[in-house]
Amino acid sequence: MNSLYTVMRGLIGLALGFYFRRIERFHAERVPATGPVLFVSNHPSSLNDSFVLGASVGRKVNFLATVQLFRFPPLKWLLRHCGVIPVNRFKDDPKAMRSVMDTFEAVFRVLERGEAVGIFPEGITHDDPQLKEVKTGAARMALELEHRHGGKLGLQMVPVGLTFSAKEIYRSEALVHFGEPIRVAEFLAGYEAGRKECIRRLTQEIETRIQNLILHLPQLEHARIVGAVKRLYLDRLRVGNLVIHEPVSRQAEDLLLAQAIARAVALAFEQYPERAAVFVTKLDFYERWLKRLKVSDEALAEFPDKEKLLGTSLFRCVIAVLGAPVAFYGWIHRFIPVRIVRYAVTFTEASKRNAQTPPAKMIGGIVAFAPCYLVYAVIFHQFFGWPASLWYGLSLPVSGLIAYYYIRNLRRLGAAMRNTTILIRAPLAARRLLRLRSELIAEIESLRPEIQSRLQPSPNP
């Protein structure tokens, strides 16, 4: 890695550390330490996907980016020195599509040096839970390069699944799930006579492997059902250890269990359509009444233990009182930079706002928070001197983070108190919803013995 790349990697890693509460790497040991590697990943979060993937790999990763970014000379210089390869898309310049071959050749040179390249073969950023159609470009590129070297280059493709708990929300979590490498040479048989067939087979393999690394829902109408079953039954699956038989992080565990639930839901609709229809009818009624009462499923589940419910609300009230002074101090200093970040988000495309919000917030945060805090520290120094200004400066990011969590938890406290009040004032409705909740869980339980064998997670290819 060159020094500029190392510096930029450190800055991006720092920004990611501030934006995300945690970035988990699952099966990172599958990434080859040496040799040419082509990372192929889903693309749920725009520019952030490159940042997260690049920061999660111990070696340098070169990424492709639209040629539009290279039209500003200083940015062009920075991108080229960081290993970013320009690619011309049809919407960038329809008359310059011949430059796609130049992109291929640039990627070939990087891989021939034994380096790594990261690409997103869907070709678009999206918010849907399912993987979009994988384009053939990655397979064409890999097979052509390996063919040029007679199958001796040793090029490997590493599928990657990126999962974000709530990508547009500050201090959320990300999971980077690495699949088993694909040896490109194994797909070269018959390449001379049937290139299209080889490209099709490798493209299908890439698509299947990425699907196995994320929560892929081919039928979007199942998404709500899967989400509901997760809320009702995920804790029981976690405690029962029915699916996972290896030590994994909490994020990886949630993903594997969600995948198992999605397969079980698909099987239930296929094998037991009438029972599935009855379940959906009950679920619709249950969720409609929760919404009407403005009560969460979590609060309803705790309602039978009123002492615990009231104790939790009281504890949150105490924390709110004790944390108020520090939170207010942090909030005052956050006010201006937060407004700048929110303004930056308005420049994202409305149709892709959820996907483009994370990088907009990260870049806006770097531009807003650091200069604002620096200005605050300089002004403070003029009045109070050294070392008071040092301690003041160090307190700003810490108190700002405390203020963020305080405001977020204050909202949760308000919701919890509202839930508690409603449930206590409407005990009949609460008991009726609890019975319906128990019936839904019992229905899930009744299907478990018949579909448990299908709940086992797919082997990672």
Image (cartoon, rainbow, N blue to C red):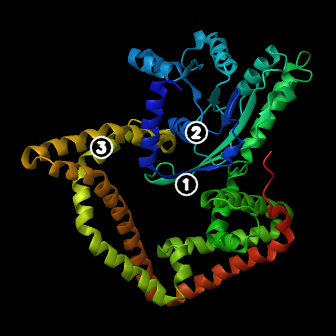
- Residue at numbered disc 1: 165
Closer to the chain start, of discs 2 and 1, is 2
Which-is-in-front pick, marks 1 and 3?
A: 3
- Please indicate whether residue 336 sits to the left or right of residue 253 in the image: left
- Residue at numbered disc 3: 369
Element on which disc 2 rests? helix
Verify CB contact (< 8 Å) between mark 1 and mark 3: no
Distance, label 3 to label 2, CA atoms, is: 24 Å
**What kind of residue is marked 3?**
Phe
The residue lying furthest to the front in this view is: 387
Sort mark 1 into few (<14), some (14-19) or many (20+) by Cα contacts within 10 Å. Answer: few
Which label sits on residue 108? none
- Residue at numbered disc 2: 53
- Please indicate whether residue 382 sits to the left or right of residue 272 in the image: left
* Residue at figure coordinates x 78%, y 18% from the top left: 144
| Residue nearest the viewer, comparing 98 with 432 | 98
Element on which disc 3 rests? helix
**Quadrant location of the C terminus?**
top right
Position of residue 85 measured from the top left corner of the image (x, y, whole percent): 56, 20
**What kind of residue is marked 2?**
Leu
* Residue at figure coordinates x 38%, y 80% from the top left: 315
